[in-house]
Image (spheres, helix red, strand yellow):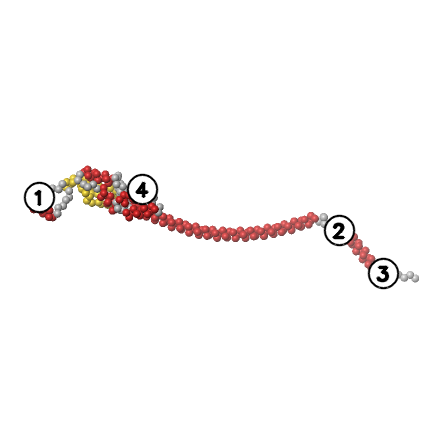
Amino acid sequence: MYSLDVNFLKDRHLDEGSKTTTAVRGATPISWRKQTPLLIGLGVGASLLGLTALLGTMLNVQKAQTQANIKQLEAEISQLNAKNQSLQAMEAKVKAIDEEASALVTVFNQIKPWSAILQEIRRRTPPSVQISTIEETTIAAKPDSGTTKPTVQLTIAGYARSFDDVNNFLLTLQNSEFFKASATRLQAAKKEKFPLELEESARANFEKRQIEVDFPQAVQYTISTELSDIPASKLLPSLARDGAVGLVTRIKTLEQKGAVQP
């Protein structure tokens, strides 16, 4: 009789091996060369995403830096505005000081001391002319004169020996820098008795002796004039000559500081 020797394990192993071999042989191998475009696309996409993220980060950094710069500029602008306001306030103060100094200089430049004026009149009065009175009159400026400065008018009255002496006195006043030549005029001149007064003892002696004294006639005159508009800084030699030393010193000090042009 025949005996069957079946090795099931062996047959099973062979079957499994055959199946495995069949499965391996049936799989298609991966071609990396064909997958290159896909890989490139994936790389480009990843690069674009990374670049986008990087650009976003850079934009955020720049935005933050720009905002910081804007805040810094706003702070600097505020400081500059404050300094500008302070500078404007200082300029206003300087302007006010300059205006006060200019007004003070104008006052000094318009002053003609009465001591100098009287000395000028005395110096120009001929020996044969006597001054009785000097009157000052301030005349307000006319609306159409173009100035608000009042006019100072002087009226000089007295006696002279003759009409020629009065005329000589008038001409000397017209030649003075202290007075306006065009405004220096002879208002009146007539013959009058010279106003001499005798002392009581002399009068009593003449009356006792019955002596009549006939005083000589003289020319009674009236001259009007106006102070000139020439600044005092242009009259320094005349002012110094007529004794206005204080005013001359002040004006020279202002000239040295540049407040008055010589």
Estimate how packed mark 2 is, as few (under 14), some (14 to 19) or many (20 or more) residues with alpha carbons within 10 Å. few
Disc number placed over residue 146 in the picture, else none = 4
Q: Position of residue 226 (x, y in %)?
A: 25, 42
Query: Which residue shows up at 82% across the image and 59% down it?
Result: 13
The reply to whether dot 4 and dot 1 touch (C-beta < 8 Å) is no
Estimate how packed mark 1 is, as few (under 14), some (14 to 19) or many (20 or more) residues with alpha carbons within 10 Å. few
- Circle 4: element type: loop
The reply to whether dot 3 and dot 1 touch (C-beta < 8 Å) is no
Q: CA distance from mark 4 to mark 1?
A: 63 Å
Disc number placed over residue 7 in the picture, else none = 3
Q: Which residue is mark 2?
A: 29
Q: Position of residue 249 (x, y in %)?
A: 30, 47
Query: Which residue shows up at 80% across the image and 54% down it?
Result: 22
The reply to whether dot 1 and dot 2 touch (C-beta < 8 Å) is no
Estimate how packed mark 4 is, as few (under 14), some (14 to 19) or many (20 or more) residues with alpha carbons within 10 Å. few
Q: Earlier in the sequence, mark 4 or mark 3?
A: 3
- Circle 2: element type: loop
